[in-house]
Amino acid sequence: MAHPPAVTTDARRRHDPAVRGFASDNYAGAYPEILAALALANGGHQTSYGDDDYTAHLRDVFRAHFGPTAEVYPVFNGTGANVVSLQALTDRWGAVITTTTAHIHTDEGGAPERVGALKLLTVPTAHGKLTPELVAREAFGRDDEHRATPQVVSLTQSTELGTLYTPEEIRAVTDFAHERGMTVHLDGARIANAAAALGLPLRAFTTDAGVDVVSFGGTKNGLLFGEAVVVLTPGAVRAMRHIRKFSMQLASKMRFVSVQFEALLAGELWLRGARHANAMARRLADGVREVPGVTVLHPVQANAVFARLPRDVSERLRKRYRFYYWDEAAGDVRWMCSFDTTEEDVDGFLAVLRAETAR
């Protein structure tokens, strides 16, 4: 029997895999299991634009985690997931209440405003978490034609500051929002890290806590590309398929997005990687707290560590390990751990940090 020829490529490796950093969990590559799933879905012809066998099965995969009414809409990226979600929950005159640190406010290039035509009503918070009392600061004027109408509350889990909402805290916000005719969106770019840290199934702090729509993150937990909009309250949204299309988030070869989510969620791959990333962040935070002159700023509850240290130390440290400033003027930095962060990575970073602060 003839064997197929070995696959070769004209591409060349153009990076050093030994270089490690703590800048973002987006810097990590993909799980080997995800790459294997992509190869599995390759070959032959499948109907395009989501009418393929893999996307058809994906609804059952997500319903196993979120409940029997969940509907899933794969998209390309996190910004797209958020913009599609929020457009589907609002009227043209609608506004979204969120935190000043929310990704939709600080890191999406104005896409909710420019693409989604949404008004964001932002509220300062101590550790990136909204409460009913904080939502109330902007939840007014629904009948005032001079003011954008508050229609959605957008939470992030885990938050941009690495903290977590309990199911009870989310339920308090969703009850407050629903009583005032608003819906609730959850930006779940790191939702796997939240579930792993809380030790709870995904539905416990989403479906069962009253959340209406989730932006489900994949790339920060080992996918090559792709995120998903998960509608938990079908009556809360309108024309999702049309909104996804005109927002330029409809993949023609959607099977390659969908099969990745099946590989991630059908077993415990998603949970295993998130638990590991969280554990590495705890290891990092424990070591940082022992370094004189360095302060951990927020509770370390998921896979992020925020710290304050002298700028000259940060600059020297950044020559060895890539990471970002969070507030450059204050000297605040963010260190992220990912599914492929190792104990050796953390310990090596701490050794350099201790040496630089001792200079």
Image (cartoon, helix red, strand yellow):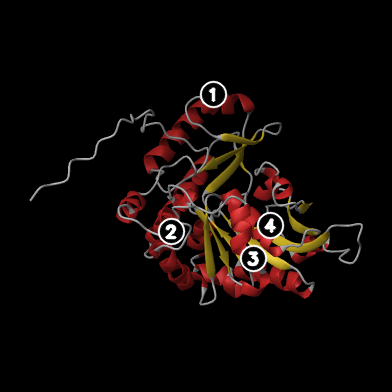
Residue 21 image point, x, y percent? 47, 35
Name the quadrant containing residue 132: bottom right
Q: Which residue is mark 3?
A: 239
Label whose residue precedes the other's in the sequence (2 or 4): 4
Residue at 45% in and 72% down: 64
> Position of 116 compared to 61: left or right?
right
Q: For marks 4 and 3, give the one nearer the viewer.
A: 3
Q: Secondary structure at mark 1?
A: helix
Name the quadrant containing residue 316: top right
Alpha carbons under labels 3 and 2: distance apart: 21 Å
Label whose residue precedes the other's in the sequence (1 or 4): 4
- Kindly check if marks 3 and 2 are in contact, taking CB atoms under 8 A apart as contact: no
- Kindly check if marks 1 and 4 are in contact, taking CB atoms under 8 A apart as contact: no
Query: 145 or 53, which is in the foreground?
Result: 53
Residue 238 image point, x, y percent? 66, 67
Q: Secondary structure at mark 2?
A: helix
Residue 258, which numbered label?
Answer: 2
Alpha carbons under labels 1 and 2: distance apart: 42 Å
**Three-letter residue code for mark 4:** Lys
User: Mark 3 packing: few (<14 Cα in 10 Å), some, or many (20+)?
Assistant: few
Q: Secondary structure at mark 3?
A: loop
Q: Which residue is mark 4?
A: 129
**Three-letter residue code for mark 1:** Arg
> Position of 93 compared to 206: left or right?
right
**Can the viewer see residue 163?**
no
- Kindly check if marks 1 and 2 are in contact, taking CB atoms under 8 A apart as contact: no
Alpha carbons under labels 2 and 4: distance apart: 31 Å
